[in-house]
Each structure stands twice: as C-alpha cells, then as structure tokens.
C-alpha cells in the first residue's frame, strides 16, 4: 500500500472521528500508529525525557509551537516491552492540521532507539485550552 493511500485512509478516519454527536460531543476516537514490536532480547528502552524531546520536534505549522509545549499531549505511557502509548488532543475539532499531528507524533517517537510500537490516540476530553500551554509557549503565542 502506498504512503499516499495510507495517509488518505488515516485522514478519512480522523475526519470520521471528528463527527459530532449529541450535545456537540465527539463521537469516535482516532489513533495513529508507528514503529514495530521490539525483539524480546532488546532490553534498551527510551526514557520519558527522550520521548518528550521527540514530541517537541512536532510543531503546529500554523503557529510553530511544538505539541508538548502547546499542552496537546495529555498522557505518555512507557510499557515494559518498549511500546509507547500517548493520549493527545488538538486545539479544536476543525484544526486544519489535526489529520497530520498524531501521525507525526507517532513517527517521531517511533524513531527513537528503544521504542517499539507507538500508539497516539486523539482524545476529546478534557478539551484543550490555552491554560494547557507552557509559559514559554504562551509568550510565543502572544507574538502571533
């Protein structure tokens, strides 16, 4: 399957996940995947700090602030087998880059040594707010 076809399928899944249900609530989850299971003999594991630094390489192209400092990442779980599970959100359901940020985050973390399968799940609760941003990100945001 070509990368373009996979990207189109991922974008379609996210668009479907952004469908609104009753009371304006999001109705479906969206998950991006990258990487592969580590061999059992591979005991090296990426640290939480390395994972965070990888997430800091992924930026919202409209405002050029990374997803970690934007406060879009809600949870990072490192499994014993090297797999990593991440819950993140986007600034708004209609965010124009919502379809690419989760996959970019999964790819960035999967590129680390000592990381197996990466799962980045978009969550809608709690809703993102500017209060989630780091102080540095808030200062940069004010420049826009």
Image: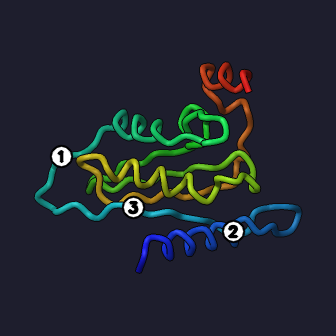
Tell me the CA gap for discs 1 and 2: 37 Å
Mark-to-mark CA distance, 1 and 3: 18 Å
Residue 119 lies, with reference to residue 141, above or below; the image says below
Q: Residues within 10 Å of mark 3 (few under 14, many from 20)?
A: many
Q: Earlier in the sequence, mark 1 or mark 3?
A: 3
Q: Position of residue 75 (x, y in %)?
A: 52, 45
Between residues 100 and 122, which one lies in front from this camera angle?
100
Callout 2: SS: helix
Would residue 89 appear left or right of 119 to someone viewing this image?
A: right
Name the residue beneath numbered marker 2: 15
Of all residues, the one furthest to the bottom in this rendering is 1
Q: Quadrant of residue 47?
A: top left
Disc 1 versus disc 2: nearer the observer: 2
Do callouts 3 and 2 mark residues in contact (Cβ within 8 Å)? no
| Residue 22 as seen in the image, left or right of residue 73 | right
Q: Which mark is residue 44?
A: 1
> Which of marks 2 and 1 precedes in the sequence?
2
SS of the residue under disc 3? strand
Q: Residue at x 17, y 63 (%)?
A: 39
Residue in the image at 45% along x and 38% along y: 57
Q: Which residue is mark 3?
A: 34
In the image, residue 91 above or below residue 83: above
Mark 1 touching mark 2, by CB under 8 A?
no
Tell me: residue 113, above or below residue 12.
Answer: above
Picture coordinates of residue 48 (x, y %)? 36, 37
Quick check: 62 left or right of 4? right
> Dot 2 surroundings within 10 Å: few (below 14), some, or many (20 or more)?
some
Cβ atoms under marks 1 and 3 closer than 8 Å: no
């Amino acid at each position: 399957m070509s990368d373009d076809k996979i990207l189109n399928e991922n974008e379609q899944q996210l668009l479907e996940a952004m469908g609104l249900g009753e009371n304006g609530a999001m109705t479906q989850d969206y998950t991006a995947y990258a990487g592969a299971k580590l061999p059992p003999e591979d005991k090296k594991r990426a640290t939480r700090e390395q994972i965070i630094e990888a997430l800091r390489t992924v930026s919202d192209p409209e405002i050029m602030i990374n997803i970690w400092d934007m406060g879009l990442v809600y949870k990072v779980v490192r499994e014993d087998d090297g797999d990593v599970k991440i819950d993140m959100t986007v600034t708004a359901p209609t965010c124009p880059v919502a379809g690419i940020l989760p996959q970019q985050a999964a790819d960035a973390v999967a590129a680390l040594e000592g990381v197996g399968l990466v799962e980045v799940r978009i969550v809608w609760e709690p809703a993102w707010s500017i209060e989630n941003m780091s102080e540095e990100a808030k200062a940069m945001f004010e420049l826009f």
